[in-house]
Image (cartoon, grey):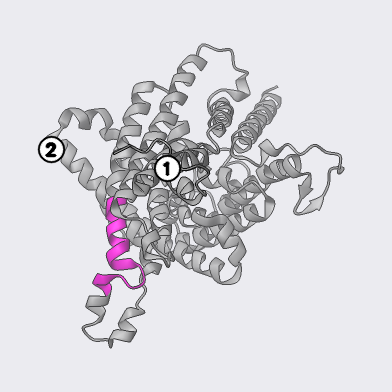
Amino acid sequence: MTYLIDILLIALGAALINNFIFYYFVGICPFIGVSRRVEMAFGMGCAVTFVMTIAAAISWTMTRFVLMPGAPLTQWIAGWWLDPQTAAGVDLSILSYIVYIFAIAASVQFVEMYLRRFFPLLYRSFGVFLPLITTNCAILFACLTIMSRLVGVDDPAARWDLGQALVLAIFGGLGFTLAIVIMAGIREELEACDVPTPFRGAPIALIVGGILAMAFMGFTGVDNGLKTALTPPAVVAQAPPTEPPSGAPTP
Amino acid sequence: MSTPSAGQRFIRGILPENPVYRQMLGLCATLAVTNNLKSAVTMGAAVLFVLVCANLMVSLIRHLLTPHLRIVIFTLTIATFVTVADRLLAAFLYPMSKALGPYIPLIIVNCIIICRCEVCAAKQGPLTAVADALGQSIGFTLALVSLAAVREILGTGMWFGFRVLPAAWPDWVIMVLPPGAFLTFGLLLGLTNWISAQRAGKEEA
């Protein structure tokens, strides 16, 4: 049960409360660049969600089994020529940035090849966005968030498992799609407006983004509220029983 | 158009081809770290270090690059220098490294650096490449500082931690929160567009 609540909070946090675009400012370049038409924005959002999920799975696996201090695979390999005490101290987390960027580039490449071969229709609709995604900060940001929940977390129970990492990636991607589609809808309408010349294009898009970010600030605190609302059993168990259970079934 | 010299490239990066206001590159960092001046300056310094090192390295190996692998080589070079910068910050400026958090590693995917490697360093000698990197990163730092100054002064009434506005100033907290970044940058961008349109108009008249 607590695990489910945890998953729900991660999902809500990634999609709405701490939206990747409006709270962390990652993925601003496509947000400004590709948000002129709703269909394009939706295609970009889907492509980002797709790649983010795959990259998150790869980077979680790499971090958990190879990169973090005390990772099993690294220890096993280091154990071939090092004594166990030294092998336990092998820490490859300094390599993590290089590994992540490589994982992202590779997954973009594979997704592109796979789509072109098996789903040509889908490839035509968002294939053009795929190469752009390699340098999309949102994806690297998701990998880094997952890393921060694994490396340096001393309590093994508090470390994220693969499910939590995937939920973060999927809902983060959905939040990104939501933001970019809302933005594209507004910008389609903006084309009919009389915007002062110096503000045409990017400046007015940024100001609209600011107003949207204000709207998304309305979600602040929802996670804490939900957490208290969803965890009554523990609270009730701690509270002293004020009256004897009167509704107990009579034999 | 003739290829610009090292000096011209240096000047060009600062204002006429400012990476933030003119080319709209590297916006994530621009918006995220400009809620106070100290983190803006640290970010600018980190980008300067990475950009100079990456440009120099790419320029030195430019004859070995093969066209279809060059982006991968650029990215791995940048990732290496970003790791160095990240470790240096964690060693000497630990609180700042904590405050900037994931935005230092996100320099890897900062479009400015990969753009300069592609446009300049892969074709020019080391001296030109370093001058170009210095110009671009100083331009980037100036843009960050201008944004951060507006946000910090209006949001807290402070400038680099010194009080500049009277204590009665009602802090516009929204300016240091995420929406303030979008609004300030949108307005400043409009302002620079307006100024350059005015100047272009004057030259024509």
Residue B62 lies in the magenta-colored region: no
Q: Is residue A65 magenta?
A: yes
Q: The disc labelled 1 sits on which kind of residue?
A: Leu
Q: Is residue A82 visible?
A: yes
The answer for which chain carries disc 1 is A
Query: A87 or B164, which lies in front?
Result: A87
Furthest toward the left, the residue is A118
User: Would you place residue A152 above or below residue A191 in this image?
Assistant: below
**How many tags in the picture?**
2
Can residue B67 be spotted in the picture? Answer: no
Instruction: Specify start and end residues of the magenta stretch as a single range.
Output: A56-74
Q: Could you say which quadrant of the image residue A180 lies in?
A: top left
Kindly state the secondary structure of the residue where label 2 is placed. helix
Out of B135 and B102, give the one closest to the viewer.
B102
x, y percent for residue A218 = 56, 31
Above or below, A143 against A83 in this view is above
Query: Which secondary structure dominates the residues rendered in magenta?
Result: helix
Q: Secondary structure at mark 1?
A: helix
**In which quadrant of the rendered view does residue A10 lie?**
top left
Q: Nearer the viewer, mark 1 or mark 2?
A: 1
Q: Are both tags, 1 and 2, on one chain?
A: yes
Residue under label 2, please give it: A117
Q: Which amino acid, mark 2?
A: Arg
Image position, residue A110 (x, y; %): 20, 47
Q: Which residue is mark 1?
A: A9
Left or right: B155 as drawn, with respect to A7: right
